[in-house]
Image (cartoon, rainbow, N blue to C red):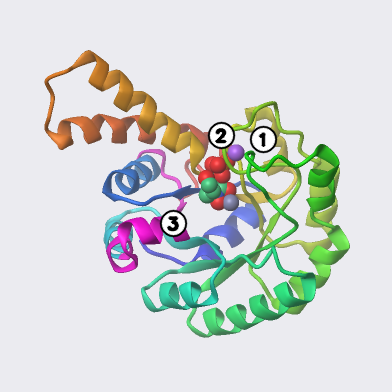
Amino acid sequence: MLVTGIEILEKAHKEGYAVGAFNTSNLEITQAIVEAAEETKSPVIIQVSEGGLKYAGIETISAIVRTMAEKASVPIALHLDHGTDFNTVMKCLRNGWTSVMMDASKLPLEENIKVTKTVVQIAHGMGVSVEAEIGKIGGTEDNITVDEREAAMTDPEEALKFAKETGVDYLAIAIGTAHGPYKGEPKLDFDRLKKIKEMLNIPLVLHGASGVPEEAIKKAVSLGINKINIDTDIRQAFARRLRDLLEKDREVYDPRKILGPCKDAMKEVIKQKMILFGAAGKA
Ligand SMILES: O=C(COP(=O)(O)O)N(O)CCCCO
Ligand code: NA
Ligand SMILES: [Zn+2]
């Protein structure tokens, strides 16, 4: 069934597990996520980035996700990932999103607070929950130095002020992860996470979780992470299976015979994440 993000994350926060938030931009990725959730009986957040909206079309990807979510036997939220443009957030609200991220993390704190507070008021008026970001979760391609990454990490005092003044439902924090594949191993600042959770006591979000070792994921969940964003690992599972399939079969030409197995490969990766995060069986 289609539900709001906070309905899924409030329970995860109370019971101490995390829910996967997986990016989609087409039919097959959406199928992989929904089938993985059904087979592991996990609640799940299906999210679309601004790039995904452009690729699929906002009405089209909304129709695909909402139709499959409404038919599913597990709770599913439709979430806007990294909504940096206010009008895009508004368009998603109009197109049936049940959770939105207003990502104004690149703005100075006061401006981030101002725009996030406005989005919270509008979204809550429509029964939709809101994620925001404090601190900077860059991409691994950003060639920033280690102490610059340190400086970009979320300050607990700022996070508390931000959560209180905006009324945001869940908060993405920067504790050492980055979008995209890692070159080395990411070092997560668990003390910082623990402090933020104790001070804010709301669901927290980990971005850039592809490529983070399983032990680090488990520790982050034990310390209060409740939404975990995964995109790169799914993309890589798709590409691996596609290359392997086409190398082995030079004759195949039916998209269903090519995309179907790729969907299954993505589904297996997603199922493992749901089990690792502790969401399996929680639906
Ligand atoms: O935090 C994440 C997931 O990051 P990743 O899967 O790259 O570790 N996302 O918000 C997904 C979109 C970012 C580009 O992949
Ligand atoms: Na990553
Ligand atoms: Zn992200």
Q: Are marks 3 and 1 in contact (CB under 8 Å)?
A: no
Residue found at x 56% / y 65%: 6
> Which quadrant of the view contains residue 213?
top right
Note whether 43 is above or below 278 in the view shown.
Answer: below
Judged from this view, the residue extending furthest toward the front is 143
Sequence-earlier tag: 2 or 1: 1
Label 3 crowd bin: few (<14), some (14–19), many (20+), radius 10 Å:
few
Q: Which residues are magenta?
A: 39-62
- Judge depth for marks 2 and 3 and give the one in front: 3
- Whether residue 47 is in magenta: the answer is yes
Q: CA distance from mark 2 to mark 1?
A: 7 Å
Check disc 2 and report the residue beneath it. 276
Left or right, 128 with respect to 149, comes to: left
- Whether residue 126 is in magenta: the answer is no
Residue found at x 44% / y 37%: 234
Check disc 1 and report the residue beneath it. 218
Residue 267 spot, x, y in % from top left: 37, 35
Sequence-earlier tag: 2 or 3: 3
Q: What's the amino acid at mark 1? A: Lys
